[in-house]
C-alpha cells in the first residue's frame, strides 16, 4: 500500500489508496520534513492502518526535494510534480487526455495525452493571491468568512463590464462580460462587494488562461484540481461562471487531493518519477 504526499507551499496533503477507497488528510506546517511526517502520522492514526501495511511513500511538491530516503522507515520515492498533477487529475475523471489545472498557492497547467505529460503554463495568481489580498484589503483570513461576505456582494460596484463601456454587447461578448476587474471601483463599494470581486478576479483570470492553454494544447476537457477549486464551486453556485469561450470544466471528487493521489499512482506505475 503506497502513501502519496504532496508538500505544497501552504499545506501538505497525504493519501492512501486502499482497494478503491481514498483516505486523505491535510495539515499545515512550515518545515517540509515535519509536514510530511505529521501528515503521514495523522493519516495512519485517522485511518487506523498499521504502519507495517504500508510499503512506500511517494512524495511530490516543492518541499519533497528535502526529504531523505526514508520516512518512518518507509522508502521515499520522489515524483515529478507536473506528472503528479497530470496523473492525479486525469485518473480522477477516468480520462487519458485532458488539460489539468492545479489551483494551489499559485496555478500550474499541465497537458496530458497518452503519449506524454507536459507543463504548458501557469500563473502566480492563486490561493496565495486570494489570501494575501483578502488580508490586506478586508482584514479577512478565513475562506469561509470571505465566502459569506461574497454572497452579499455586488460586482457592479467594482468591476467594469462591456455594458459600461459600449452600452451593450460587443461582437460575441455579452454585455455582462468583465472588461476590467476592479476597473469601476465605486466610492460606496462595500467590503462584501470587494470580497466577491476578489474571488471573481481569481476565477475569471484562471479560467480564461486555462481555456487559452486548452486551445493551444488541443484539449477539450479542463480538469480543475487543488484547494482553490472551492471558490470555483462557490462561483458556480452564485451563477457567476458564464463564459462564452467554450471549454468543458470538470471538478472531480477528491479534487483537493489530486496531486497527492497522482504521486501515489505514478509510483504504482513507475511513471513520471524523478
Image (spheres, helix red, strand yellow):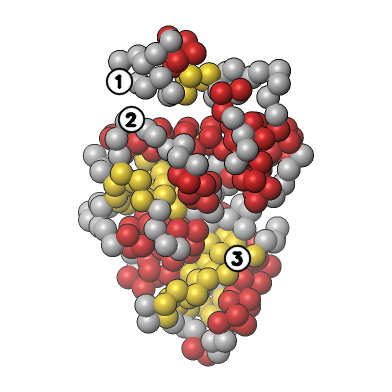
Kindly indicate whether the residue at mark 3 contacts the one at mark 1 (C-beta within 8 angstroms).
no
Q: Label 3: which residue?
A: 26
Quadrant where the C terminus sits is: bottom left
**The furthest residue to the top:** 166
Question: Upstream in the sequence, badge 1 or badge 3?
Answer: 3
User: Horizontal and vertical percent for residue 71?
Assistant: 59, 76
Where is residue 198, by image quadrant?
A: top right
Q: Which mark is residue 247?
A: none
Residue ID at (45%, 63%)? 254
Q: Which mark is residue 172?
A: 1
Badge 3 element: strand
Quadrant where the N terminus sits is: bottom left
Alpha-carbon span between mark 2 and mark 1: 8 Å
Question: Upstream in the sequence, badge 2 or badge 1?
Answer: 1
Disc 3 crowd, CA 10 A, few/some/many (<14, 14-19, 20+): many
Q: Nearer the viewer, residue 240 or 118?
A: 240
Asked if 130 appears above or below 40 in the picture, the reply is above
Asked if 130 appears above or below 61 in the picture, the reply is above
Alpha-carbon span between mark 3 and mark 2: 36 Å
User: Horizontal and vertical percent for residue 108?
Assistant: 46, 45
Which is in the foreground here, disc 1 or disc 3? 1
**The furthest residue to the front:** 152
Q: Label 2: which residue?
A: 244
Asked if 49 appears above or below 187 in the picture, the reply is below
Badge 1 element: loop
User: Horizontal and vertical percent for residue 162?
Assistant: 44, 16
The image shows a total of numbered marks equal to 3
| Residue 108 seen from this side | no
User: Horizontal and vertical percent for residue 29?
Assistant: 69, 61
Residue ID at (66%, 41%)? 149
Disc 2 crowd, CA 10 A, few/some/many (<14, 14-19, 20+): few
Which is in the foreground here, disc 3 or disc 2? 2
Amino acid at each position: 500500500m503506497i502513501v502519496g504526499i504532496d508538500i505544497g507551499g501552504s499545506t501538505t496533503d497525504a493519501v492512501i489508496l486502499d482497494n478503491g477507497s481514498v483516505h486523505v488528510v491535510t495539515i499545515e506546517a512550515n518545515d517540509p520534513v515535519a509536514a510530511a511526517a505529521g501528515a503521514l502520522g495523522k493519516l495512519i492514526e485517522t485511518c487506523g492502518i498499521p504502519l507495517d501495511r504500508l510499503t512506500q511513500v511517494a512524495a511530490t511538491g516543492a518541499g519533497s526535494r528535502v526529504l531523505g530516503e526514508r520516512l518512518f522507515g518507509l522508502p521515499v520515492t520522489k515524483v515529478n510534480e507536473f506528472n503528479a498533477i497530470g496523473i492525479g487529475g486525469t485518473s480522477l475523471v477516468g480520462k487519458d487526455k485532458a488539460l489539468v489545472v492545479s489551483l494551489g498557492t499559485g496555478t500550474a497547467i499541465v497537458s496530458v495525452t497518452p503519449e506524454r505529460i507536459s507543463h504548458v503554463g501557469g500563473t502566480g495568481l492563486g490561493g496565495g493571491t486570494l489570501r494575501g489580498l483578502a488580508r490586506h484589503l478586508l482584514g479577512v483570513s478565513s475562506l469561509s468568512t470571505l465566502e459569506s461576505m461574497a454572497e452579499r456582494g455586488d460586482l457592479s460596484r467594482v468591476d467594469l463590464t462591456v455594458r459600461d463601456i459600449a452600452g451593450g454587447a460587443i461582437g460575441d461578448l455579452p454585455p455582462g462580460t468583465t472588461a476590467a476587474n476592479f476597473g469601476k471601483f465605486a466610492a460606496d463599494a462595500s467590503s462584501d462587494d470587494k470580497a466577491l470581486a476578489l474571488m471573481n478576479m481569481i476565477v475569471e483570470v484562471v479560467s480564461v488562461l486555462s481555456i487559452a492553454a486548452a486551445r493551444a494544447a488541443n484539449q477539450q476537457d479542463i480538469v480543475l484540481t487543488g484547494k482553490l477549486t472551492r471558490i470555483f464551486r462557490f462561483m458556480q453556485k452564485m451563477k457567476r461562471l458564464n463564459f462564452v469561450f467554450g471549454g468543458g470544466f470538470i471538478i472531480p471528487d477528491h479534487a483537493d487531493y489530486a496531486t497527492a493521489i497522482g504521486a501515489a499512482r505514478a509510483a504504482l506505475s513507475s511513471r513520471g518519477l524523478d
